[in-house]
């Protein structure tokens, strides 16, 4: 799985699952472009990935802003000359302090959809546009969530957005397969990240959820390196329209 010469874009790639995927891609030899909204986290992620000896850049891009996404792809093409894989990973997490559904507002709903669903639409649209124009095929990967298939109170908007990503990915696989562009979706289980660490360390949460995970641990960002490398590499050239549930066995117990 040598990715030397490969160019990958990872949105939300400066921490958590995104950083785990980006680090795996860089270790496999890929040049990596990271998008994130926090300059300090972007800089730290670049320093981590540059240790693998390949080119890494990070830019502040809000995937919910169409102009920023279009400009981001233009800059990527100018800096790297091509794109081979796009990991649409940026998202707002399902907040643990969400109001009950009956107390939620349309503004709450739209604020999350704007990033988690609209942002993925803008990112994958521009990625598909560039990959098609290149004529070299490529890989699009969307990060959804177990919330797409398991219900959770107070996470209706998050679940709806993530369920939408699985449908979006399947349609992309069908429409762009003839151009050698494949599209797949990830369904992450409970994985450590700066957004979730404090919540996962709550004994009430740990006792209730970790007991349902057969491997008896939380996921770590590095657990996402292998699937990212596989989906970016030519080894997955016949693999499209699929969803990968990677959750330590949570979904089967």
Image: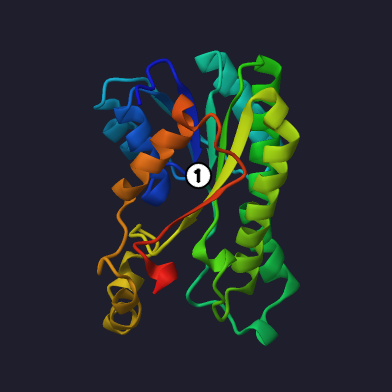
Query: 230 or 112, which is in the foreground?
Result: 230
The quadrant in which the N terminus is found is: top left
Q: Residue 56 in the image: x percent, y percent?
A: 39, 25
Where on the picture, by quarter, is residue 241? top right
Query: 58 or 175, which is in the foreground?
Result: 175
Q: Residue 154 in the image: x percent, y percent?
A: 58, 79
Please give the name of the residue rendered at 55% of the width and 22% of the height, measured from the top-left corner: 83
Query: 84 or 67, which is in the foreground?
Result: 84
Vertical position of residue 211 compared to residue 31: above or below: below
Query: 86 or 66, which is in the foreground?
Result: 86
Total count of labels: 1
Please give the name of the residue rendered at 65% of the width and 82% of the height, measured from the top-left corner: 101
Please give the name of the residue rendered at 60% of the width and 85% of the height, measured from the top-left corner: 100
The quadrant in which the C terminus is found is: bottom left
- Looking at the rendered structure, the secondary structure element under dot 1 is loop
Q: Residue 179 in the image: x percent, y percent?
A: 69, 24
| Drawn side of residue 20 relative to residue 203, left or right | right
| Drawn side of residue 116 relative to residue 252, left or right | right
Disc 1 packing (10 Å; few <14; some 14–19; many ≥20): some
Vertical position of residue 22 compared to residue 252: above or below: above
Q: Residue 48 in the image: x percent, y percent?
A: 27, 35
Q: Read off the residue under disc 1.
A: 37
* Residue 149 in view: yes
């Amino acid at each position: 799985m040598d990715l030397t010469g490969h160019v990958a874009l990872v949105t939300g790639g400066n921490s958590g699952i995104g950083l785990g995927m980006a680090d795996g891609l860089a270790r496999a030899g890929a040049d990596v472009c990271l998008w994130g909204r926090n300059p300090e986290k972007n800089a730290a992620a670049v320093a981590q990935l540059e240790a693998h000896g390949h080119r890494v850049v990070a830019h502040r891009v809000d995937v919910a802003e169409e102009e920023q996404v279009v400009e981001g792809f233009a800059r990527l093409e100018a800096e790297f000359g091509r794109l081979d894989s796009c990991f649409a990973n940026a998202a707002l997490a399902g907040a643990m302090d969400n109001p009950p559904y009956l107390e939620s507002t349309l503004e709450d709903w739209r604020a999350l959809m704007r990033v988690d669903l609209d942002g993925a639409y803008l990112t994958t649209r521009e990625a598909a546009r560039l990959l098609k124009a290149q004529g070299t095929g490529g890989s699009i990967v969307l990060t959804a969530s177990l919330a797409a298939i398991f219900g959770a109170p107070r996470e209706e908007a998050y679940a709806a957005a993530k369920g939408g990503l699985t449908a979006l990915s399947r349609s992309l696989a069908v429409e762009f397969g003839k151009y050698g562009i494949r599209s797949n979706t990830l369904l992450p289980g409970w994985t450590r990240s700066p957004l979730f660490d404090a919540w996962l360390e709550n004994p009430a949460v740990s006792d209730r959820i970790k007991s349902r995970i057969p491997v008896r641990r939380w996921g770590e960002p590095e657990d996402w390196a292998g699937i990212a490398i596989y989906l970016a590499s030519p080894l997955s050239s016949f693999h499209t329209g699929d969803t990968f549930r990677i959750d330590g066995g949570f979904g089967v117990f």
